[in-house]
Structure formats: structure tokens, C-alpha cells
Image: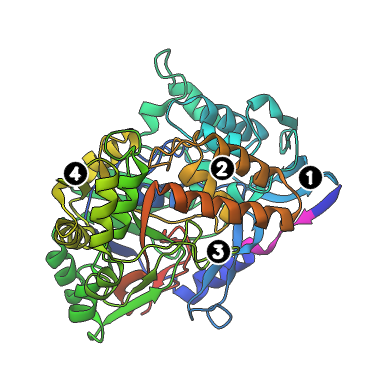
């Protein structure tokens, strides 16, 4: 057995908290939409995921790369360096099929219950059992049954995989893999809700540095720091999310200092209102995330690949980058982003409305088509994209209706695929091409296959890539998958937006991560 010992996490946390200034008491976050539904097994919405990330711990996390070593000049999580979180260390068998985790002995949940190996096993059982949850992801990771989770003793748990799996370890860091308090949840479970999903929808049962203190739907959510967190004392005592639908108001709150961080500010407003503004710090970082237009390939006329290719040629990519993103982004040219290994520029599409018309005629729609595009009402960037697409598509004979959807409703239709086309931003929490290609296009993906893509050839190839232990063969299969997706065109790749975080200049301890979640344990406010 190969021993993988990780003991840097606590040291790193202590260092970051000290540097962040542990004297801060409250941080106010101005958010555009509501924050609900933070059961780790089913969480989708970004802000709800951030709640999970701050209130729960996973078995592993990643080491923090200091700002002076990081490529963009800010501290960031190094996804090439996993380190222990709830697992103090772990062993990996020589054949890569057994992972044995040695749990910390000083962890307690919100309830005061101590962490045990049964909590890990039951978390897996729960994730596999809850409909619409992350069971499919456990399957991708090689865990199709809770029977594969073996309790060795109270603080030792072993995962027995049938074969090596390249996504198993890195995926354990995800917020959806957060370990829950099995004792507390079993106590409130019912016959109708055996895994306490309804209970946990607006509550927490985690071991992270924060707990939900209060929640008023559509108005405010407050996190409170724990005083018995195993990793030490968080740098912020209270985090207050205030729901502010108006972008202009979020900007004013930031400028006045009534908000410490304002989220979902459009690049245009960042450029004209916040850059260079006294007291404001704007952090802009290139990311592997992608803004794309999901095409529901299960319905007419989008089940016709010629129609999808017509849309691809009707899309004004350069105009979107210049007039919507104001330079805060880069063109997306592949299902695998440019900042991810094995990326290839495979997209042949440029803005060509004449070619788009020709393709519609070949598809059997010489008079054009009518389509509806949906997007989140609280996202000003996507609103601008929708307007540009409407004008551009008209040049190709495509009549586009814009459907503005409230944040809570959009999360529903995104999950159920009740749209023709939808603007969606997706970022890979694990910056790995096989992870990305599984999430977005594999038929079993209940999370993020927003194009309703289904291809037996694709599914077989992505499974083979995940199970391979030969990186040369993996790269070849990833290249083939990129070509296949570009040819089938289930979604349109618009651009890779920079991650723009707008905050007051006294906010310290910001740590960038590919999930974009603010991790308040690290953060503070300078005196």
C-alpha cells in the first residue's frame, strides 16, 4: 500500500486566518438571487453550493498556492495537490482500486456528534439513494453501491473500486461530496423522507467552520462561525447574504461600504463603475468555466443536427466578447476549455448568417424557425447575451423569443430541461477534461447534460477514458470526444468569462478556486 500523508491543511488555515486579520466580525455579501436548497446531495445553484462549502467538510481538499507563486497574482487552491481535510491521511493500493482513509479524531458536527466512519458510509448510501441527486456521480467515480464502502474501525474507512478510476480522488473534494451527520439525520428521518432530504433543504448537518444561523426566503441568510471547529477559529464571525435583485443597488452598496462583496456584476458595469474606484478591489481571473447556449436536442427542431449547426453559424462570438464581456473573457473553441489539459481548438464556427440560412434550408426550414431562449433574470450578462443573439439570429431567419426566468424557477427548469434553449454558465470544479466531459455530455449525467445529449458511441468512449491508466491513451480518447461533440453540436460554446470578484479593499484572505466559492474561513477584514 502506498501511504499518502497530508498534514498541511491546518497549518495553511492558521496562516491564512492570521494574515486575514481575525478581528473582523461580519462580512456582508450582496447577492442577486435567493439562496435555497443546500442539501449537499442535490445542490445545484451557485450560492447554495457556497453555503455547503462553508458549512460542511469533505474528506479531502487542496493545498493553497500563495499569491506570489500563483499564475494570476492571488492565492488559489492548487488542484494538483490534494491534502487531507476530514481524512488526516489515506492509503492507495498498488493496483489503484482501494482507498483507505484515516479520519481525524477531533471533528464534531453541528449537533456535537463526533465524526465516524459510519458517517462516511451513510453519506455515500444517501447520495446514491436520493432521486435526482449525485448518485450518478458516485457511479462515475466507480462507487455504485454503499457496500463498496467498508468500515475498518470507527475512524478508518475503505472504498473498494472494481477497477482504477481517474476521477475518484479529485471528485471527493467537491461540495456535493460533503460528509453529513448520519446520527442527527437518522433521528429526524421519516418513512416518506428516509434520508432527511426535506429537513436538510434549508438546514445544515455538517462539520465545517460555519452553520446557518437564520434564513428568510428571498431576503437574507446568515452564517455563524463555530467556536469548536477542528481547524481553528474562522476569520469572519458572521456572513450575511442579503438578496438584492437590482445590479445598480448592489453596486451602490459596494461603493458605500454597506456591502463587502457584491456578486454578479456585469463586465460593462465593472468597467464603467468599479475599476479604479476608491475603496474597491476588482479581482479578474481567467477561468476554465464556459458560458454556453444549451440546445435541447430531445425536441424539435433542435433534434436536427443541421438546425444546431445553423445556430452555431448564426452566433456572433466576437461581438459578444467585445460588447458584452468588454474584454473580460476569451473565445471558447472546444468542449475542453483552453485552461484544461488536452484542449484542442476544434470549433469550425464563425459568424456567417448566410451559411446558417443555407443549413436551415437543408434541414427543411427554408422559411426559418422560431425558438425561445431562457436565462436567469438576475444575471445582467446573460440578458445582454440574449439581446445580441436575438438581433444576430434574425439575420439568419431565426425568430428568437426571450424568456426571463426568476432565479428559483430557473433552477427548476434547468434541472428538468424544460426549455428549448438556455444560457448556462458551467465551471469545472475539478479542472480535468474527463471530469468535464462526463458531467456535460454523458447520458447518465443527471447534473449537467443540459443539451440532453445521448450518444452510445460517446458514452462508451468516456467510460473507457475514465477507466484507463495510460495518459497517452486517455489524451487520444479525449481528442476523439472533442471532435465528436463539435460534429454533433449539442451546445454552443460562447466564451470563457473571467471570474470577476468585486469587493472592498479591506477584504483580505481571498482564495481563488475553480468552483468560485468564497471560503470565509480564510477571509478577514483589515483593521
Q: Which mark is residue 244?
A: none
Residue at the spot of label 4: 371
**In the image: residue 443, left or right of residue 95:** left
Asked if residue 344 is positioned above or below residue 217 in the image, the reply reads below
Give the mark nearest the N terminus, 3 or 4: 3
**In the image: residue 383, left or right of residue 5:** left
Residue at the spot of label 2: 108
Residue 59 horizontal/vertical position (percent): 62, 47
Residue at the spot of label 1: 96
Circle 2: is it few (<14), some (14-19), or many (20+) Cα within 10 Å?
some
At x 28%, y 36%, the residue is: 412
- Of 187 and 293, the residue lying toward us: 293
Q: Say what secondary structure mark 3 lies in.
A: loop
Give the spatial CA distance, label 1 vs label 3: 26 Å
User: CB of mark 3 within 8 Å of CB of mark 4?
Assistant: no
Q: Nearer the viewer, mark 3 or mark 4?
A: 4
User: CB of mark 1 within 8 Å of CB of mark 4?
Assistant: no
At x 39%, y 46%, the residue is: 490
User: CB of mark 4 within 8 Å of CB of mark 2?
Assistant: no
Give the spatial CA distance, label 1 vs label 4: 48 Å
Give the mark nearest the N terminus, 4 or 2: 2
- Of 320 and 326, the residue lying toward us: 320
Give the spatial CA distance, label 3 vs label 4: 31 Å
Asked if residue 245 is positioned above or below residue 161 in the image, the reply reads below
For residue 248, which quarter of the picture? bottom left
- Of 174 and 101, the residue lying toward us: 174
Please report the bounds of the magenta region as a residue range: 4-9
Q: Nearer the viewer, mark 2 or mark 1?
A: 1
Give the spatial CA distance, label 4 vs label 2: 52 Å
For residue 450, which quarter of the picture? top left
Amino acid at each position: 500500500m502506498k501511504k499518502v500523508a497530508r498534514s498541511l491543511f491546518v497549518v495553511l488555515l492558521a496562516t491564512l486566518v492570521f494574515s486575514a486579520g481575525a478581528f473582523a466580525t461580519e462580512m456582508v455579501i450582496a447577492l442577486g438571487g435567493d439562496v435555497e436548497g443546500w442539501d449537499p446531495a442535490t445542490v445545484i445553484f451557485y450560492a447554495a453550493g457556497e453555503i455547503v462549502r462553508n458549512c460542511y467538510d469533505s474528506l479531502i481538499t487542496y493545498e493553497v498556492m500563495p499569491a506570489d507563486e500563483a499564475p494570476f497574482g492571488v492565492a488559489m487552491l492548487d488542484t494538483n495537490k490534494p491534502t487531507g481535510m476530514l481524512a488526516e491521511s489515506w492509503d492507495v493500493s498498488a493496483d489503484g482500486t482501494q482507498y483507505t482513509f484515516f479520519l481525524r479524531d477531533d471533528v464534531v458536527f453541528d449537533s456535537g456528534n463526533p465524526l465516524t466512519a459510519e458517517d462516511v458510509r451513510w453519506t455515500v448510501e444517501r447520495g446514491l439513494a436520493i432521486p435526482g441527486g449525485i448518485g450518478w456521480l458516485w457511479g462515475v467515480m466507480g462507487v455504485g453501491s454503499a457496500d463498496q464502502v467498508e468500515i475498518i474501525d470507527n475512524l478508518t474507512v475503505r472504498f473498494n473500486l472494481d477497477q482504477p478510476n481517474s476521477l475518484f480522488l479529485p471528485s471527493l473534494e467537491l461540495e456535493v461530496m460533503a460528509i453529513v451527520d448520519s446520527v442527527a439525520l437518522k433521528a429526524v428521518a421519516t418513512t416518506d423522507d428516509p434520508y432527511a432530504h426535506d429537513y436538510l433543504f434549508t438546514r445544515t448537518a455538517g462539520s465545517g467552520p460555519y452553520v446557518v444561523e437564520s434564513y428568510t426566503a428571498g431576503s437574507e441568510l446568515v452564517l455563524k462561525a463555530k467556536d469548536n471547529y477542528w481547524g481553528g477559529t474562522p476569520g469572519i464571525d458572521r456572513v450575511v447574504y442579503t438578496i438584492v435583485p437590482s445590479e445598480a443597488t448592489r453596486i451602490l452598496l459596494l461603493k458605500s461600504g454597506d456591502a463587502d462583496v457584491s456578486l454578479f456584476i456585469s463586465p460593462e458595469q465593472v468597467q464603467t463603475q468599479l475599476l479604479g474606484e476608491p475603496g474597491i478591489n476588482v479581482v479578474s481571473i481567467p477561468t476554465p468555466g464556459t458560458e454556453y447556449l444549451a440546445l435541447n436536442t430531445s425536441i424539435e427542431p433542435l433534434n436536427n443536427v443541421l438546425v444546431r449547426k445553423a445556430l452555431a453559424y448564426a452566433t456572433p462570438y466576437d461581438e459578444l466578447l467585445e460588447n458584452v464581456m468588454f474584454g473580460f473573457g476569451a473565445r471558447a473553441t472546444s468542449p475542453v476549455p483552453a485552461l484544461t489539459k488536452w484542449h484542442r481548438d476544434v470549433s469550425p464556427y464563425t459568424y456567417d448568417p448566410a451559411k446558417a440560412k443555407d443549413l436551415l434550408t437543408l434541414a427543411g426550414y427554408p422559411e426559418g424557425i422560431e425558438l425561445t431562449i431562457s436565462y436567469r433574470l438576475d444575471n445582467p450578462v446573460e440578458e445582454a447575451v440574449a439581446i445580441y443573439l436575438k438581433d444576430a439570429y434574425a439575420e439568419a431567419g431565426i425568430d428568437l423569443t426571450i424568456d426571463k426566468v426568476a432565479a428559483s424557477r430557473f433552477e427548476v427548469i434547468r434541472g428538468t430541461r424544460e426549455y428549448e434553449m438556455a444560457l448556462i454558465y458551467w465551471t469545472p470544479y475539478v479542472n480535468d477534461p474527463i471530469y468535464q466531459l462526463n458531467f456535460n455530455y454523458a447520458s447518465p449525467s443527471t447534473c449537467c447534460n443540459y443539451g440532453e445529449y445521448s450518444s452510445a458511441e460517446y458514452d462508451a468512449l468516456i467510460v473507457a477514458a475514465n477507466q484507463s491508466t495510460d495518459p497517452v491513451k486517455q489524451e487520444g480518447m479525449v481528442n476523439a470526444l472533442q471532435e465528436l461533440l463539435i460534429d454533433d453540436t449539442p451546445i454552443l460554446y460562447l466564451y470563457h468569462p473571467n471570474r470577476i470578484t468585486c469587493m472592498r479593499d479591506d477584504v483580505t484572505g481571498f482564495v481563488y478556486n475553480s468552483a468560485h466559492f468564497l471560503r470565509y474561513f480564510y477571509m478577514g477584514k483589515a483593521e
